[in-house]
Amino acid sequence: MTAPTRGEIVSQEYKYGFHDDVTYLAQTKVGLTRATVEEISAIKDEPEWMLQFRLRAYDHFLRRSMPTWVPESVQGIDFGKIVYYRKPSEREEKSWDDVPEKIKQTFEKLGIPEAERKFLAGVGAQYDSEVVYHSVREELSKIGVVFMGMDQGLREHHDLVKKYFATVVPPEDNKFAALNSAVWSGGSFVYVPKGVEVPLPLQAYFRINGENTGQFERTLIIADEGSKLHYIEGCTAPIYTTDALHAAVVEVIALPGSQVRYTTIQNWSRDVYNLVTKRAHAHARSTVEWVDANTGSRATVKYPAIYLRGEGATAEVISVAFAGHGQHQDTGAKAVHLAPNTRSRIVSKSVSKDGGRGTYRGTLKVAPGATGVVASVRCDALLLDEESRSDTYPYIDIQEDDATMTHEATVGKVSADQVFYLMSRGLTENEATNLIVQGFLEVFTKELPMEYAIEFNRLVKMEMEGSLG
Amino acid sequence: MTTPTETTPGSPAPAEALAGSPAPGGAAAPRPRRAPADLPFTFADGALAEALGAERDEPAWLREDRRAAAEVFARLPVETSELYTSYVDFRAADLFGARPYVRSAAVPAAPGEIPDGADGIIELREDAVVRLALAPGLAERGVTLETLGAALARDAASVREALTATALPADEKLAWLSRGFWSQGVHLHVPAGVRLERPIVLRWAAGVPERALLTRTLIRLDEGAEAALVEELVPSGPPIGCAAGEPVPQSLFGTTTEIDLGPGAVLRFASIQDLPSGTTALQQRTARIGAGATLRFAIAQLGGRVVRSRIDNRLEGDGSEVEQVEIIFGGRDQLFDLTAYTRHVGRDTTGNLLSKAVLQHGARAYIKGLISIERSARGTDSFLGEFGMLLDKQSRSVTVPSLEIDQPDCRRAAHASSVGPIDPAQLFYLESRGITPDEARKFITLGFLEPVVARVPLEAEQERLWELLEAKWADSLGAGAVPAA
């Protein structure tokens, strides 16, 4: 698998590949040392326990060896060449008018205000490492819904954060989670009180800006008993000439009876390493859904997980990946059944083309005591040409005698019959193939709000045209 | 995994001074706690490889092959595929006292009888041949059934290539174990165009406590040849009674089956493994399948304490085909650790793999499979199915059905896996027909495992397998655990 060279990346037209010259107010020196970690914590004026948490994570990051099974390009990341913290703006903005003009222009290009006008309940947009813009509709504030930057959350909801922070993903979980825990900055903090249903999706845009900037957002979502929430994140990043690193941690706590859906459209530029740990704890009778699409980045390592901890909890993961030239999408899902009468469903679809590589890695586990489990896994892969590759590595570990588990996987190419049929109806070959790929991914698209579905289909079409045109 | 010599910048490196000189362990020193992937024996070293070659007065090239194998064996980890490193567990086996066989194999004075319906038999008890007979006329047609020792004595050159240019996987430590330290072996050769009407029986009795028996079996079918083989792996003595709480006496049986199929050859290979409950079985089976050739595996795994098996099917020739059906009936803390690799290389090859496991009384099965479709393998049809049935809460099933696809132009590339209890609808149906619940459960369970029985090429062997399955079922009732409804 050869990675694209720098020249190739820059020459590719990347829709969101603009870059603004922003004056950073504070940034750490290149590289990662204990002093870097202490400096970040000091800039943020954090409580002592958070500093100690960061240092513990830093120590673990140093000790933990790089997993050898991750994509080769990830193994080659030079952690010493990355800037771990930048602060582009002094304070969080409550109103759109107060956001600095330069940054505002960037978001204009991303269409945030429009999206907000249309249907968003709140916007938290992360520009590099700090949340710069935030608004929560008044009615949501009134009913107690908290949607703010993680740093602000730590200040204003200290006890809640302290109670739940890193309880789902401890720093020792994996090397990238340790890195995030040591240098995290920004991300969202969401709390939905008991019985409250958030009527519209909460949305956050993340962007990497600044050459060599690592982005290490940390998101914590707490859905209290009986509440309901849909959180959407979309990612775009400008193109740079050296590798960018994105190592995020997302923790979701779905308390009894709550419903949480977390939707991601990941479209980092083709030089970003996207190493994300996403995990949810689903308590009794709660429902957690990860709806996850990965089209961008050079290499993505991400397996959204749900630990079904309470009786009657339900988990669903819908994951799609599009691996084009030089890309390796190493994605998948995990469902760990720890309680009786829990259910899970995993659906994964991947498309590989122009030498791209799509890997599904998944775990399905039924622990002793988790009786009456019903679980299913379905993964399908499409290979569009002979240069591309698809791998499927599912782990199914059943330790209860009454679990019902089914797993199916197929790999294939676009059917010549289907293309022929569509062409006989007047479509060109490109259009026909495009339509078939969109249909293949529909299991994901149909879960999106309409605006996103349109945007996602446009994205797929662009990916397809890149090869076929 | 911790690195022993981790140093922090700026600190002196005391670890360097200490490393490389482990504390000398006295005879009374307690054995350190073993990690799951630590092998439960230490006898396999260069000295043993040399002793084997000298005792048997082997040709220089074979001694060199053993020496080289011993070196690779020492170097490799027990599991090289990172997909599977978390699913290795030798902790239940303790063979540190086991002694390997070194002496030359005995050859029987009289050939002995051929079982009804078979065309030949080779029967071994531990490392000794006790029966070796071939139906009249087969030797004249060029069919060879002999021990490896006999082959070497007769015409060493004839088996040199098979022994040294083997298809055994180079990354598999346990394949190198047999290659370096085998004391007994079997050689079957069917020349071009010869079709054996009836199966050949390979009966191997093993499991003498405190012994380690390592063997190789070479099977070669030349162009257009056809044969069927029934492998019986049975206890070499009556069950050894031991008082409750006392450890079961342990033994090691490490084998290879190295199959080479020429163009258009057809081999049916059935194996019924019913080794003693204290035996650790290490099985390496590898097949090179030529153009238009067909291999059909039917394997029943019933006995043993720890069974680690690896099957490598290499579909090299265009239009080659493999069918592999494997069943596991596990009980009483048995561990079945089974990996199947199917590599599609030629055009229009077909792979059809099915594994089914019934587990009870704390039995565990790790069923791992990997289909690889190489870029050259256009028109592949490959399926891998792994299915489990857990009869109680102490048992555990792990399945890892993996795919690595490098060529999209395939007829099919799919896998499926499921685990579930006995289907209550089936139970209800049978009970409504007047069958008692216990009988109904037995029907459903044994019916689940039936696909292998039907594929055993000898009627007497089919009956024997049924008896073994029924005995295992009866054992489940005798074990006293009340199966969950």
Image (tube, grey):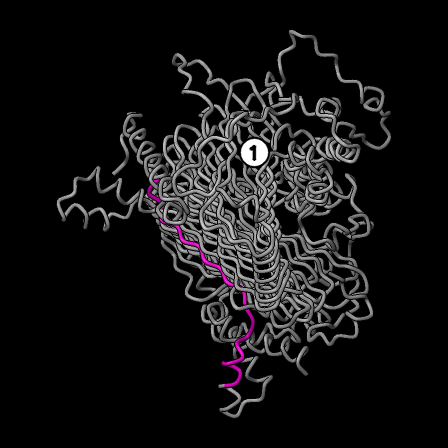
Quarter where residue A49 is shown: top right
What percent of the width, then of the height, locates residue A435?
A: 53, 80
Secondary element at image label 1? strand
Query: As shown in the figure, which amino acid type bears the numbered disc 1?
Result: Leu
Is B347 above or below relative to B386?
A: below
Residue placed under numbered mark 1 in the picture = B282
Could you say which is closer to the camera, residue B251 or residue A46? B251
Could you say which is closer to the camera, residue B352 or residue A229? B352
Q: How many marks?
A: 1
Quarter where residue B193 is shown: bottom right
Question: Is B158 on the left-hand or right-hand side of A279?
Answer: right
Question: Is A226 on the left-hand or right-hand side of B213?
Answer: left
Q: Quadrant of the N terminus of chain A?
A: bottom right
- Which chain letter goes with mark 1? B
The answer to whether residue A155 is visible is no
Q: Residue drawn at (57%, 60%), measured in percent from left and top? A: B264
Q: Residue drawn at (66%, 81%), measured in percent from left and top? A: A468
The answer to whether residue B478 is visible is yes
